[in-house]
Amino acid sequence: MVDAAMAVGEGEITIKPVPVKSRMSFLPKNFGAQFMLAERYLFDMANRCIPKEQYSGYFHYEYINYADGAKAPLLRHSTDEQIEFTNLFGRTEIVSSRCASAILTTLVLIRLIESGRISEKLHDMFCDQYYLLFEAGREFARQDGCSREFFNLTD
């Protein structure tokens, strides 16, 4: 995937894929001691939200880097197609793969935050990442022409 730049809020963000050699350290680096729980939540959410025909079971790991130095992990589905995504309340919409990825990653962060198994430091970091990813998801939706669908899935 080519690096993409876009404006979100006051600054520009870039999306950078994690090199293959760094895949093994991505989850521990971004989810701390709870990385196995994060991985379980990721696959659980993907199984619930993405139809089996569109779900390969493989995720690309990426970083969203913000102009102010903030960084958030993005767990991206392996295709650049439109995804039929079903939220946890049963609402289904067609959104871009990167919108679905932002929603899926925020769901993983919510599950980790609500688990009660994380330190206060991780709690604060995950909350910050949640809001950064949600704003990036809104911008993806705007650019990809699926703002209404994104709203329906996240509100």
Image (cartoon, rainbow, N blue to C red):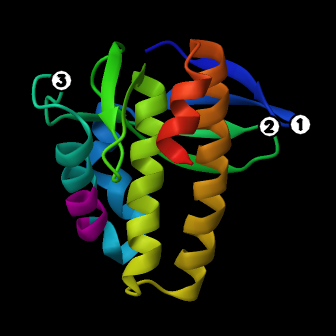
Numbered-mark total: 3
On screen, residue 110 above or below 65: below
Left or right side of 149 for 28: left
Residue ranking furthest to the left: 52
Which comes before the other along the chain, label 3 or label 1? 1
- Sequence-earlier tag: 2 or 1: 1
Residue 130, x across and y down, in percent:
58, 56
SS class of the residue under badge 2?
loop
Kind of residue at disc 1: Glu
Q: Is residue 74 magenta?
A: no
**How far is the residue under mark 2 from the one under mark 3?**
33 Å
Q: Position of residue 5 (x, y in %)?
A: 68, 19
Left or right of 32, for residue 155: right
The answer to which image quadrant residue 77 occupies is top left
The local crowd at label 1, few if under 14, some if 14 to 19, many if 20 or more residues have their Cα within 10 Å, is: few
The type of residue carrying mark 2 is: Ala
Which amino acid is tagged 3? Answer: Gln
Which quadrant holds the N terminus? top left
Kindly identify which residue carries mark 3: 54
* Residue 11 position in % (x across, y down): 84, 34
The disc, 2 or 3, on the residue closer to the chain's N-terminal end is 3
> Which disc number belongs to residue 10?
1
Q: What distance separates the C-alpha of mark 2 from that of mark 1?
A: 9 Å
Region of the chain picked out in magenta, as a range: 36-41
Q: Residue at 68% across / 41% down in the picture?
A: 135
| Residue pointed to by mark 2 | 67
Where is residue 110? Give x, y as percent. 46, 65
